[in-house]
Image (tube, grey):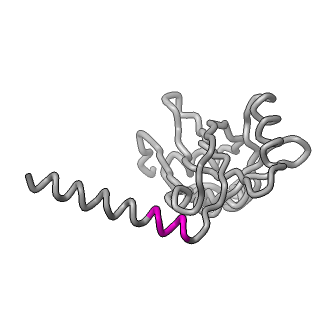
Amino acid sequence: MSPMLKTINILNKRAKFDYEIIETYTAGIVLTGTEIKSIRIGKANITEGFCEFHNHELFAINTQIDEYLYGNQFNHKAKSERKLLLNKRELKKLERAMDTKGLTIIPLKLFTNEKGIAKLDIGLCRGKKTYDKRESLKEADTKRDIDRIKKAF
C-alpha cells in the first residue's frame, strides 16, 4: 500500500505572484472515493485552477487530482469540475463580487483538516499588471537581502 501523508498541504505558488488577493474563504469539496485517496497521498495540482458559478453553485475548474494508482474501473477523471461547498451568504457575496469587472476566484491551498476531510482555500483576486509583478519581485529581493545582512550580524 502507498504511504498516506499526515498533513496534506498543496499550495498554488503562482497565486500570490499573479494575483492580488482581496479575500479568502475555506470551502469543502465534493469528491469521490478515489479522489480523496489521491489527495491523501499528495497527488494533486491546483496551480492552473479557477472557480466559476453554474446555477448559483461554485465549481473548481481545471484542478487536477491524479488518478488513484490502485483504482479500478471506478477511478475518477484527473481534470473535472468539482463542486465547492460554502454557505449561502458566502456564495451570494462571491457571486456579486464576480460581477465586478476584473475579479476572479482562484484556489490557493488544498489541505486536509484534522478529521481527514479535504478543504480548499479560495481567494477572491484581482489580476496583477506586469509592473506590479516586477514590484513584488523587488520587494522579495530586498527582503532576502535584509535577512541575509541580519544573519551576518
| Residue at 61%, 40% in the rendered image | 24
- Residue 50 in the image, given as x and y percentages of width and height: 70, 56
Look at the image and say whether residue 66 sits in the magenta stretch: no
Residue name at image x 82 percent, y 42 percent: 95
26 to the left or right of 100 = left
Comparing 65 with 110, the one in front is 110
Dividing the picture into quadrants, the one containing residue 29 is: top right
The x and y percentages for residue 26 are: 62, 36
Outermost residue toward the left in this view: 153
Residue 22 located left or right of residue 30: left
In this rendering, the answer to whether 123 lies above or below 134 is above
In the image, residue 127 above or below residue 116: below
Of residue 42 and residue 54, the one placed in the foreground of this image is: 54
Is residue 135 magenta-colored? yes
Q: Single out the residue that lies furthest toward the right.
A: 55
User: Image point 73% across, 33% down: which residue?
Assistant: 86
Residue sitting at x 75%, y 32%? 90
Q: Main secondary structure of the magenta part?
A: helix
Q: How many marks?
A: 0
Query: In the image, is 56 to the left or to the right of 152?
Result: right
Q: Whole-percent x and y of residue 21? A: 59, 49
Whole-percent x, y for residue 18 in the image: 57, 63
Find the magenta span and give its range.
131-136
Q: Nearer the viewer, residue 146 or 24?
A: 146
- Front residue of 3 and 116: 116
